[in-house]
Amino acid sequence: MSFVRRLVCLLLSGGILLPVAAAGELALGMSTALSGPTAELGIAMRDGVRLGLERLNREGGVNGREVRLLVLDDGYEPARTAPNMRRLIEEDSVLAVVGNVGTPTAIASLPLIRERRVLFFAPFTGAGVLRQQPPERYVINFRASYADEIEAMVAALVEEAGLAPAEIAFFTQRDGYGDAGYIGGLNALRRHGLEDERQVLHVRYPRNTLAVENALADLLLAEQLPRAVIMVGAYAPCAKFIVLARQAGLESLFLSVSFVGGNFLAQALGEEVGGVIVTQVVPHPEDTRLPLVADFHRDIADWSPETAPSFVALEGYIAARLLSLALTRISGEMSREKLIQALEGLGDFDLGLGRPLRLGPDRHQASNEVWPTLLKGGELIPFDWAEIPPLVPPVPAQGSGAAAGRGHAGP
């Protein structure tokens, strides 16, 4: 690589010299948060994808060619994502973009993805904008959507715990990610009897900040306190919101979608705060009874002992294993179009997750599965929706905000 190219790499990557695919290698790209308040998510996703690709390379690669992941930092800011994507697609000529983190950054990526006809594969987001019907040709997802996750939450709260739809509030990030979750939530509530969306309390905070105080004040001053709060945010502001809410005496049950990064939320809250439900779109990363999760642990031990076996890293690993399955089915010269055709040609298949997966021309989301987990004793444990009723507080007092309860910290 020339000195000029190395210098450009250094400058664009914020001081980190990034790997460039060598001659004969297949290059995949990723623009993700390696810095800023959501860096742990981006790093875990990157590490999981790399771990899955390492297995592929050690098994001979793709027709003898190694697969290299080129990663650029966008700090979870859309303004940084667009130039990253242009560099990966136009300068590095990546075969596909894999595992990008976030909805607002995905929205910023889509125009170039469409223009250059490059696969946008398994992003770490459940946003509906990436799940069009009929499917958008150049977007293929692994994970269940936020709509799938929130539908599972709402169904459990209404059908198992007996809540009225108006007793469920939303705390969301003020951007496309938060809006996607809120819209999915309203649709789920309507299916469960909500007649007027003005009955649903919705409070928000700004992306990439911890400025949750105004949102909490709006919630505490509501005419009637919610019995459950669905959170669509990042782990640090969600953790702060929960802690401050508990300190103010709010007893509501908190539920979060998977983007929060359940392991990171658990670390931020510690052992003192429990009773928080986090929906997951992958199995528990310690459930080694599942063949793919067992592979995940073996590969960590053999090739990447510094990688923590988190939900996010496992999602990245699954994405890489799924992509590897398609790559190894391509014969002849590799191309972006052939990769899409190979993924669509998988049909019904099993990766070792204990659940069937499916991709095809009319289905660009491999999984709709949602696994609920419960925060207890500083750890997320598998949870059954039938166990939700005792976690929901009784109907709160009217009009007095936090006077409804004091100091509830869950089981």
Image (cartoon, rainbow, N blue to C red):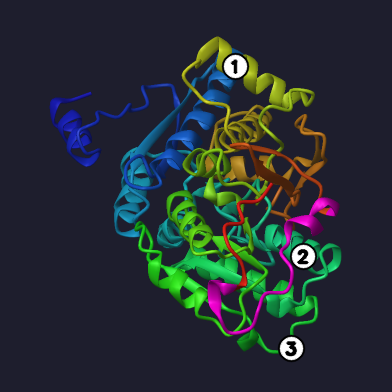
Q: Which residue is mark 2?
A: 157
Q: Amino acid at mark 1?
A: Asp
Q: Quadrant of the N terminus?
A: top left
Classify residue 243 as left or right of residue 13. right
Q: Is residue 107 magenta?
A: no
For the residues bearing labels 1 and 3, Cβ distance under 8 angstroms: no
Could you tell me which secondary element the residue under label 2 belongs to? helix
Q: Earlier in the sequence, mark 1 or mark 2?
A: 2
Q: Which of labels 1 and 2 is toward the front?
A: 2
Q: CA distance from mark 2 to mark 3?
A: 17 Å
- First in residue order: circle 2 vs circle 3: 2
Q: Amino acid at mark 2?
A: Leu
Question: Marks 1 and 2, Cα distance to the nearest angstrom?
Answer: 38 Å
Residue 195 circle label: 3
Is residue 1 something one can see in this rendering? yes
Q: Which residues are magenta?
A: 386-403
Residue 192 or residue 54, whichever sits in front: 192
Marked residue nearer the N-terminal end (1 or 3): 3
Residue 299's disc is 1
Which quarter of the picture shows residue 112? bottom left
Query: Which secondary structure, mark 1?
Result: helix
Q: Is residue 201 left or right of residue 176?
A: right
Instruction: List x then y, in percent, for residue 126.
Output: 60, 56
Label 3 CA crowd tier, 10 Å (few <14, some 14–19, many 20+): few
* SS for dot 3: loop
